Amino acid sequence: MNDQLKAILSKAKLNFAILASILTIAVLGKFTNPELTNSIFVTADQLVAELYLVFIAITLGAFIPNFKLVAFGSIGAFIAAAILIQLKVFNYLTTEYLFAILIVTLGFASIANLYRHYREFNLQ
């Protein structure tokens, strides 16, 4: 295997883990609760049309050097907002909608961060 490819793969472990977990959630969700999984991924598909969310996710993935901050910060914000939803602080926001936002954000941020790693090695 090429040394550059090995270096990209070693730097992007978290990116691949996030993308694999999204795929795993989709597959397992189809077997356990297909209606909920379909509604979450349809909502995520609709969110992609709202370009400001996609631009924010790409910006986070491409320009923040420590991708762990992006990943764990997004998950932390999701957990905090989910707790606030359960405490009835957010009345018109659902956990499913929030999870769709998390999927879109982490997916696009991971892909942008992968591309950033590729560009770093491609320019060398």
Image (cartoon, rainbow, N blue to C red):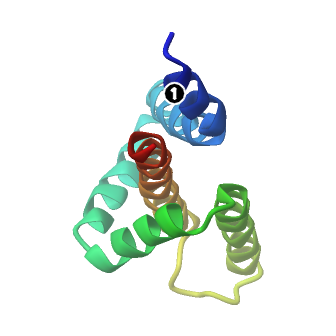
Position of 124 compared to 84: left or right? left
Q: Label 1: state its secondary structure.
A: helix
| Residue pointed to by mark 1 | 4
The structure residue drawn at horizontal position 53% and vertical position 61%, both measured from the top left corner, is 102
Q: Is residue 11 above or below residue 92?
A: above
Which one is in front, 114 or 122?
Answer: 122
Residue type, mark 1 in image: Gln
The structure residue drawn at horizontal position 41% and vertical position 48%, both measured from the top left corner, is 119
Residue 40: x percent and y percent?
42, 53
Circle 1 Cα neighbour tier, 10 Å, few/some/many (<14 / 14–19 / ≥20): few
Residue 39: x percent and y percent?
37, 52
Residue 11: x percent and y percent?
64, 38
Which one is in front, 93 or 19?
Answer: 19
Q: Quadrant of the rendered structure where residue 34 is?
A: top left
Which one is in front, 44 or 113?
Answer: 113
Q: Residue furthest front?
A: 124
Q: Quadrant of the rendered structure where residue 48 is?
A: bottom left
The structure residue drawn at horizontal position 54% and vertical position 71%, both measured from the top left corner, is 94
The structure residue drawn at horizontal position 58% and vertical position 87%, both measured from the top left corner, is 91
